[in-house]
Image: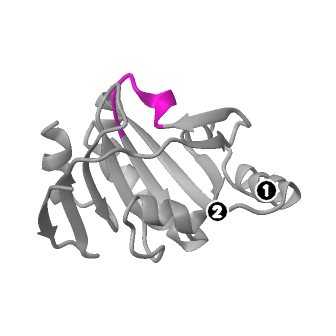
Amino acid sequence: MLFFSVSCQAEQESNVSVEYGEFPQISGRDLNKRDKVVPDDFVDKNLIIIVAFQQWHQPLVDESISLLENNGLGETHNIIEVPTVQKTSKLAEVYLDGIMRAGIRDDRIRNRTITAYLDKNQFLETLDIPSDETIHWFLIEKNSKDILARGYGIIAEEDLELINSY
């Protein structure tokens, strides 16, 4: 895989790379209980996927999405957050979905939050993510699964120029 890495400094270090590869197809459900396939159901514009692994990642996701939306990327890109959770029992999934839905009343946020219950280790390996200690984000090309850029940590001001360049 060819890639070019650019390091950026923000309040939290953000590592960004431009590379070629495909985002795997994952099935999930948004917080309005609709089945979704990522990235296939979001191909009409370039897509920014923010993947979270821990409950405490939510402030990192919120700060990243706020920066994107405050800079107009909500108009030009689809922006989704994908909490990834290790596949467990259906009962545990229903319970966790209910807790998340109860905490988020805004339909717009519920629509863009797609929870994926999957084999987390396989997902990390497929995307070459070394750990689940912070969020990871991916810029996916319109009408495809092609990864145009990716990074980890909070999306920083410096990352916007790269994201906007596609």
The scheme the figure's colours follow is: one colour
Query: Residue 36: x percent and y percent?
Result: 61, 34
Looking at the image, which residue is at 34% across and 26% down? 45
Q: Observer-nearest residue: 121 or 29?
A: 121
Query: Is 43 covered by the magenta stretch?
Result: yes
Residue 117 placed where, x, y %? 67, 55
The C terminus, quarter of image? top left
Q: Farthest residue toward the top?
A: 44
Please say if 53 is above or below 117: below
Q: Is residue 88 left or right of residue 121?
A: right
Could you say which disc has been placed on residue 93 in the image? Answer: 1
Give the residue at x 14% y 70%: 7
- Residue at image position (48%, 73%) is 132
Q: Is residue 149 above or below residue 25?
A: below
The crowd level at tag 2 (other Cα within 10 Å; few <14, some 14-19, many 20+) is some
* Of the pair 66 and 37, the residue shown nearer to us: 37
Residue at disc 1, secondary structure:
helix
Q: Which residue is mark 2?
A: 85
Image coords of residue 59 (percent x, y): 48, 66
User: Does the magenta run of residues contain 1?
Assistant: no
Q: Magenta part of the protein: which range? A: 39-47
Residue 52 position within the rendered picture, expressed as x and y whole percent measured from the top left: 50, 62
Q: Are marks 2 and 1 in contact (CB under 8 Å)?
A: yes
Determine which quarter of the picture holds residue 35: top right
Residue at 33% over, 65% down? 154
Kind of residue at badge 2: Val
